[in-house]
Amino acid sequence: MTIAPAPPASIAAVDRSRRAGWRKLPRKAKVGCVILGLVIAIAIAGPFLAPDNPSVQTGALLHGPSLSHLLGTTSTGQDVMSQILVGTRATVIIALAAGVISTIIALAVGMTAGFLGGIWDEVLSLVSNIFLVLPALPLLVVLLAYQSARGDLGTILVLSALGWPWGARIIRAQTLSLRNRDFVAAARELGEPTWRILMFEILPSELSLAAASFVGAVLYALGASVALAFLGLTDTSQWSLGSILFWAQSENALNLGAWWWFVPPGLLVAIIGVALVLVNFGLDELGNPRLRVRQRQPGRSRRSARWLPSDPTPVERRTRTGSTGILQPGPAALTIGQRPAARPTADGAAGGAG
Amino acid sequence: MTFLLRRAAFYVVAAWAALTINFFIPRAMPGNAIDAMMAKFPHLAPQAFNALQAEFGAGGGSVWHQYVSYVANILHGNFGTDLIEYPASVSSLLIQTIPWTLVLVGSATILSFVIGTLLGVAAGWRRGGSLDQVLPGLIFLQAMPYFFLALLAIDVFSLHLHVFPGQQGYSNGLVPGWNPAFIGSAIDHSLLPALTIVLTTLGGWMLGMRNMMITTLGEDYVLSAVAKGLPDRRVIFTYSARNALLPSVSAFGMSLGFVVSGALVMEVVFSYPGVGLLLYNSVTSDDLPMLQAIFLVISLAVLGANLLADIAYVLLDPRSRTKEAFT
């Protein structure tokens, strides 16, 4: 009889959840996915749909929204609608690429620190904690102020270099708790090399966490890249949602009363952000079924519901691992999901701790 | 005490890391920053050129030698010379702007923390009540970029409703000083920026506190406090809120870097004469020494605030005084 590697039960679990995934997703997560899908569609098709060349200056200066210019024109007569349709692509690409790279770094650092322990853990945890407390934006500004670092690739690299510590911290905590599980011990007994244990035993069990940290990293990269573009630190000759806002600000759109110039791009950024937050909430629920909001059982008064024993694990543990829902735009935001209408039971409420 | 010592040691290491990053950025960047700056400022005084060379490593000496003298300079509070307003030192420019940011961002952040926490206590106590309905809206505000909300606020409150002044830190024509006219004007100008900071950060504190309240309210010791017939006030504040507050306090320090970053960009929108505007101006004028000094000062300030949050944590949580707390 051949000895197969420890059956990766976690993979089966992931497969199952993937198959039943969409229907089981909470409604808010579905909404988030749909919005993100639309945004990605705009990013792909936008430049072909744009009615005008976004950089061409027409004679229609500062016109409000009309049939010929659905979202009005800028002070040099450029079509705002076309700028948004074209610019979404750059913003989405930067956010996604920085999200992917940060997540890979976060996984590598978090899994190494959690699994190897000892001096590795000390050093890597120290480094990620340092990057967590240093204010990211001023550092980003300093890095990008050197002209040579600008451009898309430079921006992506710099954003990724600063976007990983949050995820690394969470993944390290999870790896620590997985390290001593039976299936990992079995794999070790079978003499599997460390990299194989990490890739095929640990990683699959952490997929939902990795996905959540990816969404968090994308959210961070979105906010930071738009802010940097707004400050004029990325290539302002290239259209992105941030550079539209940069031009609106430097051309004084506010005092000219040209709301159609800065409200739509800003609102689009905000909507993408909210969609990411909603998706993160859904992922969190999938990975941790306890978080699901249950309907209140009939016959229980609100008062008695308050004294239900609460779920002992999530809140405390999750806050310790750092996802307090307070600071970073990261996994933080998981929380939004609380349905205002449903009356959360003790379990459901604990889920909010995110 | 061990806990605080450990944290203090960590912040020293973090401060050293910030210093070192700051030292190596100009040296690691491809291209010669000095040439670029010389091209930008053709009329630079020779002294400025020398200062620049020393600062950016084009001068003589080994890297190690430069590093030592750089650290010594920083320890003496000498952050270098500003290019734009030569020979004004960077420190003197920073000292003019820091109070504006410190007062505005500091008080707005603390206000947001206090209000958010109190609202969270109320929402946790009356779970499913009307406060819970407000949360998604607050989170929406949090998901949008700070500066965008600031733009909207200026548009609505300043340009259309004329309730608040939308630009600058005080009215034109006033001379900064400790007189009622100036202070009144400064407060008037700080209201709208402060409001946007509070609005965008409130939701996070409220949510965190609400969820922790719900957890602690389910604990046995709270149940027994209720069974004893203690008044609600006492159950809420002395029994549950006190414990529920701990994660918020430990998160407070770490959120500061994020809050400060957002507030810096917001200052640009309001033309508020703080560090954020200084940062923006040095970016637009390629004033690299200034930029690096600002980064350093902001980092050190955030680290200091973190230490304060840790001290508050130790005061609030007796457990952290006896055994080794979380890292």
Image: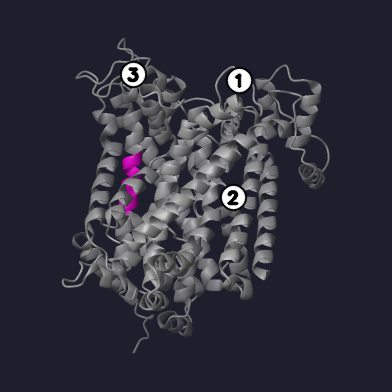
Task: Identify which residue is drawn at 80% across, 42% down.
Answer: B76
- Is residue A124 visible in this depiction of the protein? no
Is residue A76 or residue B261 the one in the foreground? B261
> In the figure, residue B66 lies in which quadrant?
top right
Circles 2 and 3 in contact, beta carbons < 8 Å: no
Query: Over which residues does the magenta segment extend?
Result: A270-279
Q: Residue at x 35, y 76 (%)?
A: A8
Residue B158 in the image: above or below residue A140: above
Check disc 1 and report the residue beneath it: B174
Q: Are marks 2 and 3 on the same chain?
A: yes
- Quarter of the image containing the C terminus of chain A? bottom left
Residue A9: name its quadrant: bottom left
Q: Looking at the rendered structure, which numbered label has been put on residue A258? A: none
Q: Where residue A92 sits in the image (x, y, percent)?
A: 36, 41
Question: What's the chain of the residue with tag 2?
Answer: A
Report the Cα–Cα distance between label 2 and label 3.
Answer: 39 Å
Subunit that carries the residue with mark 3: A
Residue A160: x and y, percent? 49, 48
Q: Quadrant of the N terminus of chain A?
A: bottom left
Q: Is residue A82 magenta?
A: no
- A189 on left or right of A3: right
Q: Residue B151 in the image: x percent, y percent?
A: 41, 30
Have a look at marks 3 and 1 and say if they share a chain. Answer: no
Evaluate whether label 2 is on the same chain as label 1.
no
A182 shown above or below B57: below
- The three-letter amino acid code for the residue at tag 1 is Leu
> How many numbered badges does the structure rendering display?
3
Residue B223 appears in view: yes
Real-space Cα separation, disc 2 to disc 1, in angstroms: 36 Å
B82 or B248, which lies in front? B248
Secondary element type, mark 2? loop
